[in-house]
Image (cartoon, rainbow, N blue to C red):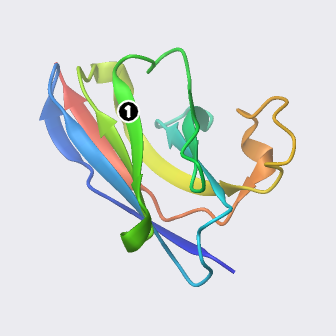
């Protein structure tokens, strides 16, 4: 089993930056694929990005491509989401989760294929 904990959220002005962390514990994270999602009030949970712990291959939603960057620290079992040029529409609770169907890369944005969700961290971008 693996447990995930998000951190790093906060309040930032439009155009600013934040770095979110997703720390894994319990099971060795090597071999897992981690997805980032966000959910604004009254909206469905939305795919943001994903990264493979082993190899570091990444995939980004069009809405964040060029502004958000994924990285990882294997020694600390942590994935980072560096967010730059933030916009008010980026305001949401951000979650990380494990892709339970990483063997199949078809429709990797489907929220239903992910599990072991963290508690989320709030990101608020003011205009």
User: Could you tell me which residue is drawn at 56 percent across and 23 percent down?
Assistant: 61
Q: From the viewer's perspective, tell me whether residue 56 is left or right of residue 1.
A: left
Task: Quickly name the residue at label 1.
Answer: 69
User: Could you tell me which residue is drawn at 30 percent across and 42 percent down?
Assistant: 123
User: Could you tell me which residue is drawn at 62 percent across and 34 percent down?
Assistant: 44
With respect to residue 38, does 86 lie above or below? above
User: Quadrant of residue 7 in the image?
Assistant: bottom left
Q: From the viewer's perspective, tell me whether residue 59 is left or right of residue 87.
A: right
Q: Nearer the viewer, residue 100 or 73?
A: 73
Q: Quadrant of the C terminus?
A: top left
Image x and y of residue 49, in percent: 54, 35
Image x and y of residue 77, in percent: 45, 69
Mark 1, Cα crowd under 10 Å, few <14 / some 14-19 / many 20+, is some
With respect to residue 49, does 3 lie above or below? below
Q: How many marks?
A: 1
Q: Which residue is most to the front?
A: 55
Q: Secondary structure at mark 1?
A: strand
Q: Quadrant of the N terminus?
A: bottom right
Q: From the viewer's perspective, tell me whether residue 91 is left or right of residue 34.
A: left
Q: Which residue is most to the bottom?
A: 26
User: Could you tell me which residue is drawn at 37 percent across and 21 percent down?
Assistant: 89
Image x and y of residue 58, in percent: 56, 35
Image x and y of residue 78, in percent: 41, 63
With respect to residue 26, does 101 lie above or below? above
With respect to residue 36, does 66 lie above or below? above
């Amino acid at each position: 089993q693996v447990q995930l904990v998000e951190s790093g959220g906060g309040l930032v002005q439009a155009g600013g930056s934040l770095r979110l962390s997703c720390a894994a514990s319990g099971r060795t994270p090597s071999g897992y694929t981690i997805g980032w999602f966000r959910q604004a009030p009254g909206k469905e949970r939305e795919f943001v990005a994903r990264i493979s712990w082993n190899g570091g291959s990444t995939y980004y939603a069009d809405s964040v491509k060029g502004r958000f960057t994924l990285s990882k620290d294997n020694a600390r079992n942590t994935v980072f989401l560096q967010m730059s040029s933030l916009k008010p529409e980026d305001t949401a609770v951000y979650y990380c989760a494990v892709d339970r169907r990483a063997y199949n890369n078809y429709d990797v944005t489907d929220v239903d294929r992910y599990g072991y969700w963290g508690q989320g961290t709030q990101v608020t971008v003011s205009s």
